[in-house]
Amino acid sequence: MMRITRAAIPALSRGITLIAVMVLIGLLPWISGRDPALSILRARMGDQNPTPETLAAIRQQLGLALGPLDHLWNWLAGVFRGDFGTSWISGAPVLPGLVQALGVSLGLMAAALAVALFVAVALCWPTMRRGLRGRDTRSSGVVAACLTALPEFMLSAVLLVVFAVWLRWFPPYGWHGAANVVLPALALGLPAGGLLGRLLENAIAATFHERWIATWAVAGFGKGQIARAVLRRSLPALMPQIGMIIVAMTGGAIAVEQVFSIPGLGRAVLGAASAQDLPALQAGILLLLVNALFIGIVANLIRIALLGRALEMGAMPVPQVLQAAPSRRLWIVPGVVSFLMLVLVVAGLPRDPFTSEYIRLQPPGLLLPLGADGLGRDVLARVAHGAVSTIGMAIVVTAASFVIGIGMGLMPRLAIGPIEVTKATPPTIAALIVTAAMGPSAVGAVVAVSAVAWAPLAAHTAALVTETRAQPHVQIAPVLGVGPLQLLPRSILPAITGPVLRHAMLRLPGNALALAALGFLGLGPKPPSPDWGLILADGLPYVERAPFAVLAPVAALALMSVLGVSLAALSRR
Amino acid sequence: MSFLTVRDLSHSYRGARRMWGRAPDLPVLQSLSFDLAAGERVGIVGMSGSGKSTLLRCLMAMGRPQSGEIRCNGRLVVMGRPASLRWYRRVVQYVPQDPVASLEPRMTVAQLVAEPLRRLRIDCDPQSRAQEALESVGLGSQYLSRRPDELSGGQAQRVAIARAIAMRPAFLMTDEPVSGLDMTVRAQVVQVLRDLSQTHGTGIVMVAHDISVVAALCSRTMVMEHGRIVEDRPTSEILKAPHHPHTRQLLEAAPPLVAAA
Ligand SMILES: Nc1ncnc2c1ncn2[C@@H]1O[C@H](COP(=O)(O)OP(=O)(O)OP(=O)(O)O)[C@@H](O)[C@H]1O
Ligand SMILES: [Mg+2]
């Protein structure tokens, strides 16, 4: 009996988590506390003053005078019938339009995947060649690191400005033909390809260092055979990470669609969020989640097929163990980047980011080093204040995700459902849910990113706990009279806090970028906050006349990305 | 009247999980039964992997055996809440196979040895009792504030022994307490165990690969092979006339010193 219940815990945990997510999405209209009748009236009849009678009539008409449970039940029953409700704005069923949008998004994903694969192969090619010739296989990985460092929303903005606005090689927006696909696919595929290539490259290089390669070469195996064997050996271990990269792409696609005005699912959902069209938002979030979960599951199945057996609970993807004392030289890049960031903040913090003191789009000058933005505000001041608020929020996210990650990682069986679902949820989707529930805000962005940022830390904690529990000095604990609860402060917490804290700190720049992306998409702090994402979004329309209003936040974001990648590289040695 | 009775003890480890279906069980202990009398000194020998450490872990109730029962003075020993086994922990203590790794790396020697005295609520002054136990294994007060990584292998071994004997247990289970030590330290450790047995009447179970160590300390020897006890007789008889072929193999493999002993 005991054994059966223990074995059932992970399955139960997964099931309950999925149900909880469904309930959360189903209750969004109710949680948001928004009166749908009011929204509908505004959308259909403009600013007419609503009388109580008209509101009641609309409520009656839509069956909206229901409590939360009836509401939830109606929605769930509808979902199982394939009926996702009707839009509050247009009054039409929401599903057909969203399915069409999903088709567009999948097309974009496919193109981006092709780009990513091409980039990854190009990055691995030299390593493979060197390995087959029997030379040293290490490569610097600088190109890959640079590609990885670019968040999609920023890369989209840069590509749009350079290739569509300045060079006019490609159309800036729309989804009509092949020319429309190029820039979005690059924006989405380049970072993913960089990451993929880096992982593959490292794995291949490591495989070439194994002894059997030399044996095979001496035994006269052909280069093709060896190359195939090396791939077969290197790929399976990477499958979970490859799955996570593709899942992350579904989140990145939302930003890319928004920048290039592609009529995909992400843009549709963002539109629904800003129009407060909750039925469309619910359906869209559900589709995005199903899409991401589906990708996660497929990656997992491929890995199981390649590895030949499933991994035990204790063997969740073990992150690289962070080792102490890396060489001094590796600290140069993060050090320089931190210093530049500090200079920016010190220079801009005493200035005023909110008042429109200058001429709109005033060019840079001695007194105004980075010019003024479209409202005549000091760009330097805005970027500096943005650094403080974005990094401050990222610190809060890091602390929260550290605490949640440790807590969840201490009970991996129970937490397996939340961990898996959270891993399959890009921050943007989490932010859509939070925004639907409480409107866009800085607090909402922090909540959304924290809600997903803990998952890798929990997985790390779980791996460390398993490792620690297997150690003889923990195994002997019962003999010494140490109970399971006393074991936590005695042996387990001291062994895991250090490494997990370091891991959490390494993710701080990534959290800052995720927060900036939310600001950019209108899911974070509201104007006039000097959030980096908002500054970039504000500057884009005026990029030709005031490039600094775009370049400054892009440079700040790029610094943050480089910081993230160089710190992550530190941990890998 | 026997101190510890073991009946039909079986244990198996779960094998690697298959893609479909459940993991196969790997039997390690197969229906063992024996008695240990109070104050007895028993050696357990057998080849690597024969299940000696697993047997000791089962005797220490560190894992739940598949089947069978262990009684101490007639009282059933089952794994459960820590408090419910406190009585057993007080009378039966344990020195694990890898003593260096069995010491919590963040604690000092003094804390390590005093810990079970506190946790198991032994009625004494833990600090002075710990110091006393350390002295009896030849570790003076200069070691009290060291941490495990500042000890040599033999010193850590002796700290683990001190931790167990500070409890003044009625029985001490030691898993290869002298392997990996050089000859002089080896003799010293065997002497500590013999003194313990002679002055306090402590019973000792000692696991060893090497039959010569058992011969130096134990009056009774059990020979294990593939999870079974294939021979269980007074040590002197086994040395003179081994019954089981496996015992003969073990004797032949042992250094010539045994023959003299
Ligand atoms: N945690 C475990 N999981 C699975 N199998 C195990 C585990 N511990 C031990 N075994 C297996 O059980 C068998 C007995 O192991 P045990 O450690 O009891 O042997 P031993 O007689 O103490 O050997 P040695 O003399 O090398 O210490 C071995 O085949 C071992 O591979
Ligand atoms: Mg052993």
Image (cartoon, rainbow, N blue to C red):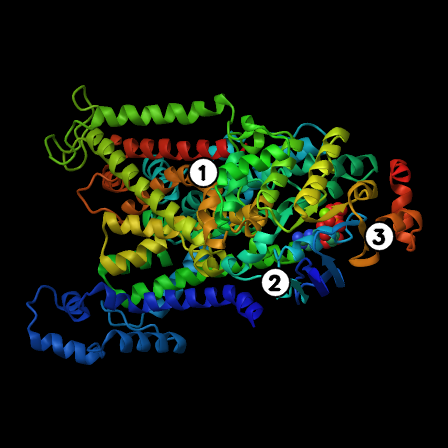
- Position of residue B205 relative to residue A390, above or below, is below
Residue farthest toward the front in the current orientation of the protein: B199
Q: Is residue A281 left or right of residue A9?
A: left
State the CA–CA distance, disc 2 to disc 3.
Answer: 27 Å
Q: Which mark is residue A36?
A: none
In this figure, which residue is indicated by the disc labeled 1? Answer: A498
In this figure, which residue is indicated by the disc labeled 2? Answer: B77
| Quadrant of the image occupied by residue A80 | bottom left
Q: Which mark is residue B234?
A: 3
Q: Residue at x 50, y 65 (%)?
A: A9
Q: Mark 3: which amino acid?
A: Pro
State the CA–CA distance, disc 1 to disc 2.
Answer: 38 Å
Q: Residues within 10 Å of mark 1 (few under 14, many from 20)?
A: few
In this rendered view, identify the residue nearer to me: B234 or B206: B234
Label 2 or label 3, whichever lies nearer to me, is 3
Residue farthest toward the right in the current orientation of the protein: B241
Q: Chain of mark 3?
A: B
Q: Position of residue B90 (x, y in %)?
A: 57, 52
In this rendered view, identify the residue nearer to me: A404 or A382: A404
